Image (cartoon, rainbow, N blue to C red):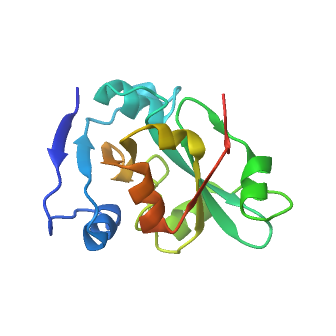
Amino acid sequence: MGKKNKQAKGTGSTPATVQLERAGVEFHLYEYEHSNDHMDDGYGVEAATKLGFDEHQVFKTLMADTGTERVVGVVPVSGHMDLKALAAAVGAKKATMADPKVAMRESGYVVGGISPLGQKTRHKTVLDESALQFDEILVSGGKRGLSVGVHPNDLLKVLDGIAAPIGTW
């Protein structure tokens, strides 16, 4: 099982935690030993398993391209992102998954550690509305083996994001 730390002010170790600290948002850090043994299931499923959280409460960050801009979708690791629903949520006609190299360059993070927080380039962000049923959801803390627990409304506020039904199971 991973370890849970309440993050103290001023000790942010990634751009994601720094953004939360600056916003004055309460959050928790969850660390676990990342291993390539779980890669068939995905990074998010590994986090849920090792930290002992339900896969519906742990969210992955995905970047899509609408043709005019890139947008970030945050969906439970238990499912997939509905690109058509994501496009509709941001007023676009369509969306396709962004190239992983573009996602890494624009987010400043590596695949498997991409956080919706603290990205190099600010993007419109859409959180799957299923997150709103939880008092705390986990998203990547900005590196593999680090998750951030935050209230979904606080996440939306910090990111100036919206909630919409963009996940599929």
At which x and y percent is residue 24? 26, 68
- Is any part of residue 73 visible from this angle? yes
In depth, the one of 138 and 154 nearer the eye is 154
For image coordinates 61% across by 31% down, the residue present is 79
Q: Residue at x 36, y 28 (%)?
A: 53
Residue at point 51% right, 33% down?
42
Count of labels shown? 0
At 80% from the left and 68% from the top, the residue drawn is: 67
Q: Nearer the viewer, residue 75 or 106?
A: 75
Whether residue 115 is visible? no
Image position of 39 (left or right of 79): left
Q: Give the left or right position of residue 97, taking residue 126 as reference.
A: right
Q: Indicate the quadrant containing the C terminus: top left, top right, bottom left or bottom right.
A: top right
Choose top left, top right, bottom left or bottom right for residue 69.
Answer: bottom right
From what the image shows, is residue 60 above or below residue 1?
A: below
Determine whether, in the image, residue 124 is placed left or right of residue 55. right
Q: In the depicted view, which residue is nearer to us: 6 or 115?
A: 6
Where is the N terminus found, in terms of image quarters? top left
Q: Position of residue 168 (x, y in %)?
A: 68, 34
Residue 167 percent location from the top left of the image: 65, 39
User: In the rendered view, does 49 fall on the left or right side of 75?
Assistant: left
- Determine the image quadrant of residue 100: bottom right
Pinpoint residue 38: horizontal percent, then vertical percent. 43, 26
